[in-house]
Amino acid sequence: MSLRAKTKNSLIAYGFLTPWLIGFFGLVLGPMIASLYLSFTHYNLLNAPEWIGLENYKNMFFDDDNFWDSVHVTAKYVVLSVPTQLLSALLVALLLKKGLKGIGIYRTIYYLPSLLGGSVAIAILWRNMFDSNGLVNSFLALFGIQGKAWISHPDYALYTLVILSIWQFGASMIIFLAGLKQIPENLYEAAEIDGANKFQSFIHITMPMLSPVIFFNLVMEVIKSLQAFTSAYIISGGTGGPINSTLFYTLYLYQNGFSFFNMGYAAAMAWILVLVLAIITGILFITSRYWVYYEDAGGK
């Protein structure tokens, strides 16, 4: 190929890449660099940023009780919601793999909440359902059970958000179902001939063969849970209440940025979240070599 033809091909390639490059530098890399700079400043949107070094990070870790409340609430939410949601998704996927009639309808029914669950409308519906006079307490009253003030009580408010998260297991379920269908049936037939029961087949065949899918879903759900915002904002009215019981990390970050106009502090919080996400994801990838089985790689 001549030099002229190579140059022409390169120009065409860069022409196609130009929209992506503009988006990457203008909407991703540029704002990230600006955010990193602002994290070392005091900036209230009205005045020019004032350089204060590590002061935002120092205040965050040593002087801000709300910061640690938000870390505690978010960690508890992740620990409760992620395993429960993945287990629910796997159980439903195993049931749907049985080849039920109208399986497409069931897949749609179970997948629909994951499309709607993160919306404002569903969060409002959820708040009304778990309100003191909501649908849940009305249902319990039919059996003579006195319902709780689920949303307005600090002991129960977070659990309503966990239930909402579990209800959105549809996306993970679809991925589990696809993974289950990729497991060769001859493995189960060989295990049955060798005398293995259903539970043993599940432990020694299904789980290892499905481990890459479990790993993928685990990483995605951990990242999504750490970034949860809409449900807590709507249900708590943007306050994180009652008594900070639903003060998610992202909600407190939002409050600092857009309620208190402390953009420098909010930028510092955002970078801490990025670092935590990177560390947790890195740990999951490092530990995956001990429990994720890749058939093409010949084992763990």
Image (spheres, rainbow, N blue to C red):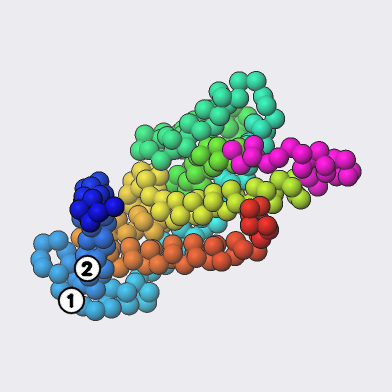
**Amino acid type, residue under disc 1 in the picture:** Trp
User: Disc 2 and disc 1: Cα gap in Å?
Assistant: 8 Å
Residue 115 occupies which quadrant of the picture?
Answer: top left
What residue is shown at x 33% (from left), y 63% (from top)?
Answer: 270
Magenta extent: 178-201
| Vertical side of 205 occupied by 269: above or below | below
Give the residue at the far top of this rendering: 101
Query: x and y percent of residue 179 in the render?
Result: 61, 42
Q: Secondary structure at mark 2?
A: helix
Whether the magenta-drawn stretch holds residue 28 is answered as no
What residue is shown at x 10% (from left), y 66% (from top)?
Answer: 47
Query: x and y percent of residue 157 in the render?
Result: 47, 48
Whether the magenta-drawn stretch holds residue 182 is answered as yes
Main secondary structure type of the part rendered in magenta: helix
**Quick check: can you spot residue 128?**
no
Mark 2, Cα crowd under 10 Å, few <14 / some 14-19 / many 20+, is: many
Residue 116 occupies which quadrant of the picture?
Answer: top left
What residue is shown at x 21% (from left), y 65% (from top)?
Answer: 34
Q: Nearer the viewer, residue 96 or 149?
A: 96
Q: Nearer the viewer, residue 294 or 105?
A: 294
Give the residue at the far left of this rendering: 47
Q: Which mark is residue 51?
A: 1
Q: Which mark is residue 38?
A: 2
- Quarter of the image with the C terminus is bottom right
Q: Secondary structure at mark 1?
A: strand
Q: Which mark is residue 122?
A: none
| Vertical side of 119 occupied by 228: above or below | below
Q: Disc 2 or 1, which lies upstream in sequence? A: 2
What residue is shown at x 61% (from left), y 20% (from top)?
Answer: 102
